[in-house]
Image (tube, rainbow, N blue to C red):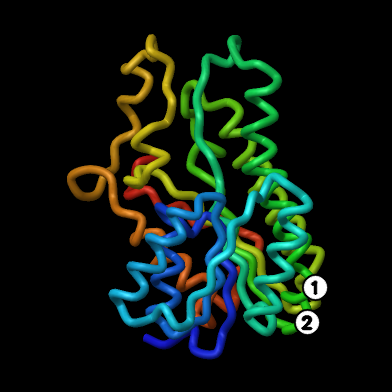
Amino acid sequence: MNRFTGRRVLVTGAGSGIGQATALRILAEGGSVAAADIAEAGLEKTRALAAEAGTDERLSRTVLDIADEDSVRARVDAAVEHLGGLDVLVNAAGILDSRHTGAMTLEFWNRIIGVNLTGTFLVTRQALPALLATGKGVVVNFSSTSASFAHPYMAAYAASKGGIQSFTHAIAAEYGKQGLRAVCVAPGSIDSGMTRAPGLPRDADPDLFTKLVPALGEGFAGPETVAGAIAMLASEDGAFITGTELRIDGGTHM
């Protein structure tokens, strides 16, 4: 498929996991991608994988801290200038950490909210002028099944992802008449660096996790599962989808 031929896409969190898989998927479908991540080594890995696929000529990279307003202003503007405009923004960057809620410090809470929720806002705000200029821009944000279903020890993470869902609804309504679509993916039971090391307390009760089992397959799915859904939502195949979430969890939360 070549659904992204001639389209310019910024993907945050593109140095690993779902963000990386999404950048590679869009490149494979003909798009030009600005890959952004806080980890330069991750971006180099993305470049190497794109080179193996023969798509690296349409890939640019930028080191970006989405929680830092100055970094967002400079790096997003530079990425858009390099691309020559912007058709799609994929806000995949985020962090996952866990604590007993009663033991959470304000610093811990603010770090999770600051990266996941505020970071999504900062990047979206900076990219909006370029997205609106196309008359058919798309924002794909990352929520999580934890936003709607109970995931123990993840109160800060769940709150950040619930906020992202609400933020997505708001901008979809606010800018819909200007042609902007805004959607969320809500992954769950996906094998990535975040889910392999969620930072659970040492005394975490395993019984609280017994329901978090996919109905499909034999375990967690790979990041490419979500990347394929994002490619659909961000392409013309998703042209009538906005202001909603797509849960991708293999039936974990049916």
Estimate the spatial distance between the alpha carbons at disc 2 and disc 1, rounded to whole Å: 6 Å
Give the side of residue 96 with respect to residue 159, left or right: left
Could you say which disc has been placed on residue 137 in the image? none
Residue that label 1 marks: 129
**Residue drawn where x is 59% and y is 69% of the image:** 10
Task: For residue 184, say whether it is visible.
Answer: no
Q: Eyeballing the image, is 149 above or below 35?
A: above
Which amino acid does the dot numbered 2 rest on?
Ala
Q: Quadrant of residue 89?
A: bottom right
Q: Quadrant of residue 236?
A: bottom right
**Residue drawn where x is 46% and y is 73% of the image:** 232
Number of marks in the rendered image: 2
Q: Eyeballing the image, is 3 above or below 66?
A: below
Q: What secondary structure is found at the residue carrying circle 1?
A: helix
**Residue drawn where x is 34% and y is 36% of the image:** 196
**Crowding at label 1, few (<14), some or many (≥20) Cα neighbours within 10 Å?**
few
Q: Quadrant of residue 64?
A: bottom right
Residue that label 2 marks: 133
Image position, residue 30 (x, y; %): 44, 85
Q: Residue furthest left?
A: 218
**Residue drawn where x is 38% and y is 60% of the image:** 45
Q: What secondary structure is found at the residue carrying circle 2?
A: helix
Q: Nearer the viewer, residue 230 or 192?
A: 192
Give the side of residue 174 with respect to residue 72, left or right: right
Which amino acid does the dot numbered 1 rest on?
Pro
Would you say the residues marked 2 and 1 are in contact, meaning their CB atoms lie under 8 Å apart? yes
Image position, residue 142 (x, y; %): 55, 52
Image position, residue 97 (x, y; %): 50, 29
